[in-house]
Image (cartoon, rainbow, N blue to C red):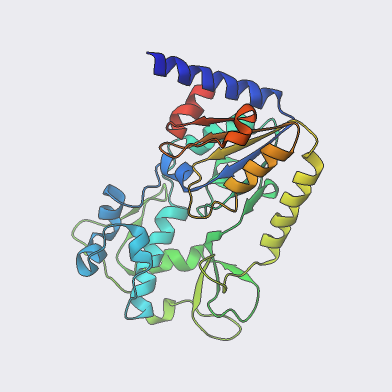
């Protein structure tokens, strides 16, 4: 009972801080998409990757993404399914839409390490988003020979269909009855750079080949400009589901802003990993709870 009251009090404080703020900066990590239903193991893995899991011994999508496949045809069979269900297929359980409803009438900006495009699907304005780590929906030259990215939806759709999958009217990927999926795609569907002919890769920050294209640079500049314009205003840094894989992008910066900016307030919501540093205890709040439940409580 006491724990429920404590959580209710925290929800009320969050609501007050957001309503009173001049601006909101959302920092979103993988935990937000997990709360929204984008799990990378368990039922979703078994539904779409049980054949790969049985063949190579991995049991989650991340591990399969790093497997050293023998051919590009097999590599893209795996990755086309991966991209499709995590970028183009709807899974969202309302978490992103609830977050949008919470901030849509405020002056907001989103900084995220997520690459699944869910913010725009939920209604967030593109010009208020900075996807720091790339986008599942973009290809780039694997070398890269030039700093440009390419939309991949048609190619990804063609690759999953070539494996025997079908796409329902609502966009859901499914196997027709009696069909066993192929674990490779035709060689002609393997994406290649239009300039140098080398194999393409996803536009995901994994090493120093990541392409920061014109869109990425514009979003970065927009984020910097937003911060400069709001540094003296009442600003809430709302951190959602950010872990410690890349804490320097969001978490550590938010702590520093909360400590140094007079009118800043920091909120961390992250089940199992919520933490508030001692030096900002009077300017912050940590909520160790399910993000979806907290957002529902705020509306």
Instruction: Classify residue 60 by image quadrant.
Output: bottom left
- Percent x, y of residue 237: 64, 37
Q: Residue furthest bottom?
A: 196
Q: Quadrant of the N terminus?
A: top left
Regarding residue 299, the answer to whether it shows in the image is no
- Percent x, y of residue 232: 80, 36
182 in relation to 260, above or below:
below
Residue depicted at x 40% and y 14%: 2
- Percent x, y of residue 227: 75, 45
Relative to 8, 209 lies left or right: right
97 in relation to 12, above or below:
below
Q: Residue furthest front?
A: 278
Relative to 288, 132 lies left or right: right
Instruction: Classify residue 86 by image quadrant.
Output: bottom left
Q: Quadrant of the C terminus?
A: top right
Viewer-closest of 6 and 79:
6
- Percent x, y of residue 209: 57, 74
């Amino acid at each position: 009972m006491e724990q429920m009251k404590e959580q209710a009090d925290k929800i009320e404080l969050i609501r007050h801080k957001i309503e009173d703020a001049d601006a909101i900066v959302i920092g979103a990590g993988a935990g937000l998409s997990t709360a929204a239903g984008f799990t990378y193991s368990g039922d979703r893995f078994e539904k779409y990757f049980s054949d790969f899991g049985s063949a190579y011994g991995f049991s989650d999508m991340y591990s399969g993404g790093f497997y050293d496949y023998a051919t590009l045809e097999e590599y893209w069979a795996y990755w086309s399914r991966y991209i499709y269900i995590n970028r183009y297929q709807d899974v969202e359980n309302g978490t992103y839409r609830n977050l949008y409803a919470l901030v849509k009438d405020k002056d907001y900006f989103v900084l995220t390490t997520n690459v699944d495009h869910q913010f725009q699907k939920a209604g967030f304005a593109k010009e208020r988003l900075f996807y720091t780590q790339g986008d599942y929906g973009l290809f780039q030259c694997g070398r890269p020979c030039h700093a440009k990215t390419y939309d991949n939806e048609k190619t990804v759709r063609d690759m999953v269909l070539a494996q025997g999958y079908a796409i329902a009217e609502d966009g859901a990927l499914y196997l027709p009855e009696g069909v066993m999926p192929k674990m490779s795609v035709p060689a002609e569907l393997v994406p290649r750079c239009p300039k140098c002919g080398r194999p393409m890769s996803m536009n995901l920050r994994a090493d120093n080949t990541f392409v920061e294209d014109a869109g990425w640079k514009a979003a970065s500049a927009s984020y910097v400009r937003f911060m400069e314009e709001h540094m003296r205003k009442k600003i809430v840094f709302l951190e959602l589901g950010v872990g410690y894989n890349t804490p320097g992008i969001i978490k550590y910066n938010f702590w520093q802003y909360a400590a140094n900016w007079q009118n800043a307030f920091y909120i961390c919501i992250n089940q199992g990993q919520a933490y508030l540093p001692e030096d900002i205890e009077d300017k912050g709040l940590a909520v160790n709870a399910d993000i979806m439940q907290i957002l529902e409580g705020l509306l």
